[in-house]
Image: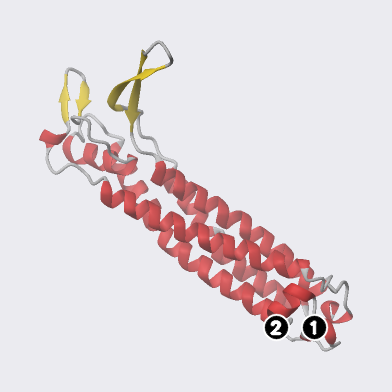
Amino acid sequence: MPTSNHPASRAQRPLPTLLLSALILALGLPIPILAQIFSRVFVPAITLGSKTIKVGPNNSTKTISFGLLTGPVDAVIAASFISLISSVILIGALGIVRHVSMHNVWGWGLVVPAVANLLGQVGALAYVFIVHGQHKEAGSVEEVRFVDGRYDTNGTLYTTEAWACMMERFYASQEPWAKKSCSDLKTGRILTIPMTVCALVLAALSLWQVQRRGGFRWLLHGQGRMAMKSESIPL
């Protein structure tokens, strides 16, 4: 049977909990906030290509326009939100498990957000670097010409980061925004690496806390060291 309140859960010292909470905040907040800042930059909307398709029973046509690939930027922003939200949940669950209730549902409150955060960060990291490798910057100005007041890429699609960096390389004088946007978007993409490392540490910390309270036996059945004994675990 799942356990509920237990005297041992209230015997924990507050200082270690505060230190663990501070560690979670340090791992889960600053880098994601920076990733948000660096990813939210100005890049003008632009049409890189279009395609006409037939739709409906009357074979009427519809033209679809293709713009910059914003998926990598969206992935960085989504990953940062996942880190921020999961960190707040982890701190709440940690405090409850250590000082309020030993019900095993709060153990899941430690494990699920941490694992979800890790999976989200790994997925975002893989996605942004794969797309970055598939849609590289143009090698020369001939691949992205400025003709009759518009850019012509001959139908080639580019990510937001690649476009900003191409504008800096080839058209810096007429696109003054490009230098900062290129640098910031690169930084935002690279920040997915430390966000993933931090997510791994947070997952390890959460599993460590669960293990000290009985491990998966406690999670699944509410039975474990803290559930069955009145001893207090120092940390």
Picture quadrant where residue 1 is located:
bottom right
Picture quadrant where residue 166 is located:
top left
- Pointer 2 with pointer 1, Cβ within 8 A: yes
Observer-nearest of 119 and 97: 119
Secondary structure of residue under mark 2: loop
Observer-nearest of 1 and 58: 58
Instruction: Tell me residue 155's x, y (percent).
Output: 22, 30
- Name the residue type under label 1: Met
Q: What label sits on residue 117 in the rendered view? A: none
Q: CA distance from mark 2 to mark 1?
A: 8 Å
Q: Is residue 191 visible?
A: no
Q: What label sits on residue 226 in the rendered view? A: 1
Picture quadrant where residue 10 is located:
bottom right
**Is 143 located above or below residue 220 in the figure?**
above
Q: Which residue is mark 2?
A: 212
Secondary structure of residue under mark 1: helix
- Name the residue type under label 2: Arg
**Is 44 located above or below residue 119 in the figure?**
above
Residue at 45 percent across and 50 percent down: it is 76
Residue at 52 percent across and 53 percent down: it is 80
Instruction: Tell me residue 84's x, y (percent).
Output: 59, 55
Q: Quadrant of the C terminus?
A: bottom right
Mark sitting earlier along the chain (2/1): 2
Instruction: Tell me residue 57's x, y (percent).
Output: 43, 14
Coloring scheme used? secondary structure
Crowding at dot 1, Cα within 10 Å, few <14 / some 14-19 / many 20+, comes out as: many
Crowding at dot 2, Cα within 10 Å, few <14 / some 14-19 / many 20+, comes out as: some
